[in-house]
Image (cartoon, rainbow, N blue to C red):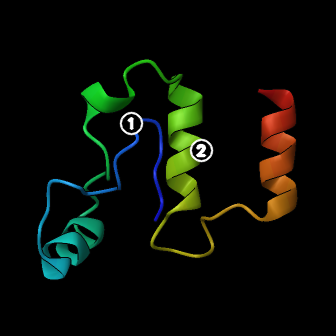
Amino acid sequence: MLQLFSGQSPYSWLTQAMHVIAARVGGIEPFAARQIASVEYGHKRYSLRCISNDSRDRPDVSGIVEFLGTS
């Protein structure tokens, strides 16, 4: 299962799959701001791109490697 920054699964506060789907469609980010407060803004934005609803927004592997090499 995917875990980023906090050690918790995305949308861990939601208990039903339909609520998770509604959150994703509604643009609600999967982590509360306090959970990732120690993560730089650019890293947060990039990680959220990786789990974007729109596959065109997600970086490919070479883009991820490049981002990690420059950050």
Q: How would you rate the neighbour count of disc 2 (Cα within 10 Å): few for under 14, some for 14-19, many for 20 or more? A: some
Residue under circle 1? 6
Q: What is the quadrant of residue 38 in the picture?
A: top left
| Residue type of the residue flagged with mark 1 | Ser
Looking at the picture, tell me which residue is in the foreground, 35 or 8.
8
Image position, residue 15 (x, y; %)? 11, 68
Query: Would you identify the image quadrant in which residue 26 lies?
Result: bottom left
Left or right of 37? Residue 15 is left
Is disc 1 surrounded by few (<14), some (14 to 19) or many (20+) residues within 10 Å?
few
Residue 45, image x and y in percent? 52, 41
Q: How many marks?
A: 2
Q: Is residue 39 above or below residue 51?
A: above
- Element type at mark 2: helix
Q: CA distance from mark 2 to mark 1?
A: 16 Å
Residue drawn at x 49%, y 65% is 52
Q: What label does residue 52 carry, if any?
A: none
Q: Position of residue 56 (x, y in %)?
A: 63, 73
**Quadrant location of the C terminus in the rendered image:** top right
Helix, strand or loop at disc 1? loop
Mark 2 and mark 1 in contact? Answer it, CB < 8 Å: no
Residue occupying the far top of the picture: 38
Question: Which of pointers 2 and 1 indicates the residue nearer the eye?
Answer: 1
Q: In the image as oriented, which residue stretches furthest toward the bottom? A: 18
Question: Horizontal and vertical percent for residue 24?
Answer: 29, 68
Query: Vertically, is 39 above or below 22?
Result: above
Frontmost residue, 43 versus 1: 1
Q: Earlier in the sequence, mark 2 or mark 1?
A: 1
Residue ID at (13%, 73%): 19
Q: Which mark is residue 46?
A: 2
Q: Residue at x 15, y 81 (%)?
A: 18
